[in-house]
Image: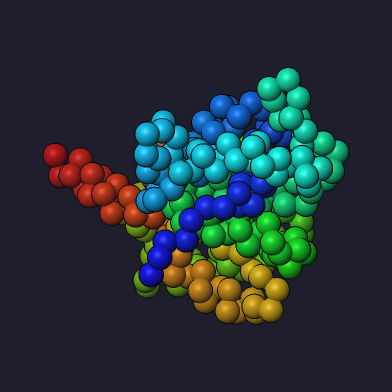
Amino acid sequence: MEEKRITESDLILPALYLMDAKEGAITTSELITSLTQVMKPQGRDAEILTNRKDTYFSQKVRNLKSHNTLAKLQYANFEEGKYILTQKGAEFLAEKKHLIEYLFDSSFEYTDVKNNISKIYRTKTPNIKLFTEYVEEGSAISVNHKSYKRSQKLRNIAIEYFSHNGIISCDCCGFEFRSYYGNTYGNPHCIEIHHLKPIFQYSGISEKQTIDEALDNLMPVCPNCHRVIHKKGISKNDIPMFKKQIQTLQMS
């Protein structure tokens, strides 16, 4: 099966997001660097073009300018060597910004980021619901009361799912709150739930189906391991090596 490649349209929302983060203006070079950092292109997209310094990914970013993609949509103008975010671009981004923040702040694999950005860009925002209840590493994800209740439900189901005889441990280092803090302070609900893959609910998919599928992409972790995973950008594919390194350190 042929690998699904990044497209110019897939880069529109991320470009607007990074423009907004740079106070509404960003150069092409800055955009290439920042998009590469947050999306971490892999496979064919990460390969260097023949007789060029660009990768297939960075060339797609340059094409946003050469094809006037953002200007045609009236999302950004290119002035004095910089993209300038327009009011229309800011309004379009505002509808979907919390979804993009979630993708970029959660150490997801490139394929997951790429595929979900494509869905977010093409789907009306009210038809996409975000399953998350926490603010992660300084990311200001706003969650309304209804979304909070839904994500709390997912968290509670996940804790029950991963518990064994009332005990739930960190899937990385093995830390278990009750054995360390005792019954008075060792509440199993102190555990955190890490998202290995993006968890959205799309229109037409029931909440039950979303939660059932989500359980395969969640992992209970202690706050320390959770912070390391996000700070170091440890993706789902890197988790086994992370666990192995922890086990090696614990035995030494």
Is 76 rendered above or below residue 122? above
Identify the residue at image location x=58%, y=67%.
Answer: 154
Residue visible at 72% across and 34% down in the picture: 20
- Location of residue 148 (image quadrant): bottom right
Q: Picture coordinates of residue 166 (x, y %)?
A: 41, 69
**How far across and how far down the image is residue 86, in percent?**
82, 36
Extreme residue in the left direction = 252
In the rendered image, which quarter is residue 62 located in?
Answer: top right
Residue 167 shown left or right of residue 208 in the figure: left
Q: What's the image's color scheme?
A: rainbow
- Is 78 or 152 nearer to us in this picture? 78
Residue 219 percent location from the top left of the image: 42, 60
The reply to whether residue 150 is visible in this rendering is yes
Residue at the spot x=58%, y=74% of the render?
210
Q: Is residue 99 left or right of residue 124?
A: left
| Mark count | 0
- Most distant residue in the top direction: 80
Q: Residue 238: image x %, image y %?
A: 33, 50
Residue 60 vertical position relative to residue 21 in the rendered view, above or below: below
In the rendered image, is residue 225 in sight?
no
Which residue is at the far front? 51
> Between 195 and 237, which is closer to the camera in this rendering?
237
Up-down relation of residue 79 to residue 122 (above or below): above
Task: Place residue 246 in its image quadrant.
Answer: top left
Tell me which residue sits at (77%, 33%) in the image.
77
Q: Quadrant of the N terminus?
A: bottom left
Camera-side residue of 20 and 7: 7
Q: Nearer the viewer, residue 114 or 232?
A: 114
Q: Quadrant of the C terminus?
A: top left
Residue 24, placed above or below residue 50:
above
